């Protein structure tokens, strides 16, 4: 049990460190990626007002499974919704996770859909 709580504590430290750098150094909205075992979520947040501007997830898109293909679909959806709201550039908040696998697939799909980070 101690091993699990250490992992969670370290993940929370990475999340705080990444978010602090993004929020204090950027005027752009933040593209936040949350990854769970079953689903992947993405939302664009304006930190100055505290509002979620655009959101997409594998739950909302009714995609079964949490694989790279689901992440690509969510990335494409968030990119299209952002363009509809006239959001062109964001800063990427990977949430303390490695830029690899599903997180990387979501980011690349969002870039292909027209978002810049």
Image: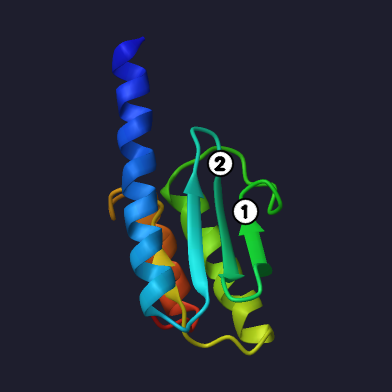
Q: Is residue 83 above or below residue 17?
A: below
For residue 17, above or below residue 53: above
- Name the element at disc 1: strand
Is residue 14 at least partly visible in the picture? Answer: yes
Q: Mark 2 points at which residue?
A: 39
Q: Do the residues labelled 1 and 2 touch (CB within 8 Å)?
A: yes
- 83 displayed left or right of 28: right
Q: Residue furthest top?
A: 1
Q: Quadrant of the C terminus?
A: bottom left
Query: Residue 41, how many percent across, how many down?
Result: 57, 52
The local secondary structure at tag 2 comes to loop
Instruction: Rate crowding at label 1 as few (under 14), some (14 to 19) or many (20 or more) other CA atoms within 10 Å.
Output: many
| 62 over 47 or under it: above or below | above
Q: Mark 1 highlights which residue?
A: 57
Image point (59%, 69%), residue name: 45
Q: How far apart are marks 1 and 2 (CA)?
A: 7 Å
Counting residues from the N terminus, which is met first, the one under dot 1 or under dot 2?
Answer: 2
Which quadrant of the structure image shows residue 55? bottom right
Look at the image and tell me whether residue 96 can be seen.
Answer: no
Residue visible at 68% across and 84% down in the picture: 85
Pick whichever, 106 or 99, lies toward us: 99
Using residue 4 as the reference point, say whether residue 38 is left or right of it: right
Task: Residue 72: give x, y in percent of width and height.
Answer: 47, 59
Q: Residue at x 30, y 35 (%)?
A: 10
Residue located 48% across and 84% down the image:
114
Q: Where is residue 19 in the image (x, y as percent from the top left)?
A: 40, 60
Indicate whether 84 appears above or below 23. below
Of residues 29 and 70, the one drawn nearer to the viewer in this rendering = 29
Residue 34's disc is none
Q: Disc count in the image?
A: 2
Residue 9 image offset from top left, x and y in percent: 35, 32
Q: Nearer the viewer, residue 44 or 116?
A: 44
């Amino acid at each position: 049990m101690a091993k699990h709580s250490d992992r969670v504590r370290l993940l929370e430290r990475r999340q705080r460190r990444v978010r602090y750098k993004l929020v204090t150094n950027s005027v752009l909205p933040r593209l936040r990626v949350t990854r769970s075992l079953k689903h992947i979520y993405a939302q664009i947040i304006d930190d100055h007002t505290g509002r979620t501007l655009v959101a997409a997830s594998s739950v909302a898109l009714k995609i079964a499974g949490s694989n790279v293909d689901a992440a690509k679909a969510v990335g494409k959806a968030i990119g299209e919704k952002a363009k509809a709201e006239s959001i062109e550039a964001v800063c990427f908040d990977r949430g303390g996770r490695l830029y690899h696998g599903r997180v990387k697939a979501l980011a690349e799909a969002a870039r292909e859909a027209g978002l810049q980070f």
